[in-house]
Image: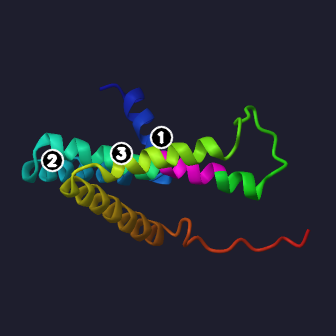
Amino acid sequence: MSSASLKCESEDAPLLRRFGLLQATALNMSNMIGVGRIRSFFSLDVVIEALISTRIVVQFMGQIFALILLRKRAPDMARPYKMWLYPVPSFIALLGWIFIFVTTAWPVIVLGLGTLTLGTIFFFVWSWYTERWPFAPAIQDAGY
């Protein structure tokens, strides 16, 4: 190794510490190990179905609720698109996603919601530990 590469690595170290990349890497590795352990208890099909059922709840249903909430909280906000017959398509999509979620096998639903619950708990513990949202200190008004 040349001294230039060592110097570059030493200059990057504060950035890694500042942005918490070392901790994020360690958490990602432990997450992969955790998924591997879950995989050893369940077949790959069950794990994939549980991940998809969690995605249905978090992403697809979450987007529908976020759209409704955004329209209520910011009705005058400029939008690059329009939804015809709003909110009818949202409710039809929500009913479809609920149907897909409910017709999934119960062990898969329990596993998916269990991992979602564990992820939420870990998120709040990590947020509390690092003093980030929702546990961040309140910003003082500068008096403007």
Q: Residues within 10 Å of mark 2 (few under 14, many from 20)?
A: few
Disc on the earlier residue, 3 or 1:
1
- Mark carried by residue 141: none
The answer to whether residue 97 is magenta is no
Q: Secondary structure at mark 1?
A: helix
Contact (Cβ within 8 Å) of mark 3 with mark 2: no
Q: Which residue is mark 2?
A: 36
Residue 115 is situated, as x and y percent measured from the top left of the image, at: 29, 58
The answer to whether residue 62 is magenta is yes
Specify the principal SS of the magenta part.
helix
Contact (Cβ within 8 Å) of mark 2 with mark 1: no
**Is residue 84 toward the left or the right of residue 10 in the image?**
right
Kind of residue indicated by mark 2: Gly
Comparing 100 with 51, the one in front is 100
- Mark carried by residue 11: 1
Camera-nearest label, 3 or 1: 3
Disc on the earlier residue, 2 or 1:
1
User: How many angstroms separate mark 2 from mark 1 (CA)?
Assistant: 35 Å
State which region is magenta: 60-67
Which quarter of the figure has residue 65?
A: bottom right
Disc on the earlier residue, 3 or 2:
2
Residue 9 is situated, as x and y percent measured from the top left of the image, at: 40, 37
**Is residue 57 toward the left or the right of residue 70 in the image?**
left
Residue 100 is situated, as x and y percent measured from the top left of the image, at: 36, 45
Comparing 81 with 91, the one in front is 91
User: How many angstroms separate mark 3 from mark 2 (CA)?
Assistant: 26 Å
Q: Residues within 10 Å of mark 3 (few under 14, many from 20)?
A: few
Residue at image coords 33%, 48%? 53
Residue at image coords 54%, 44%? 92
Q: Which residue is mark 3?
A: 100
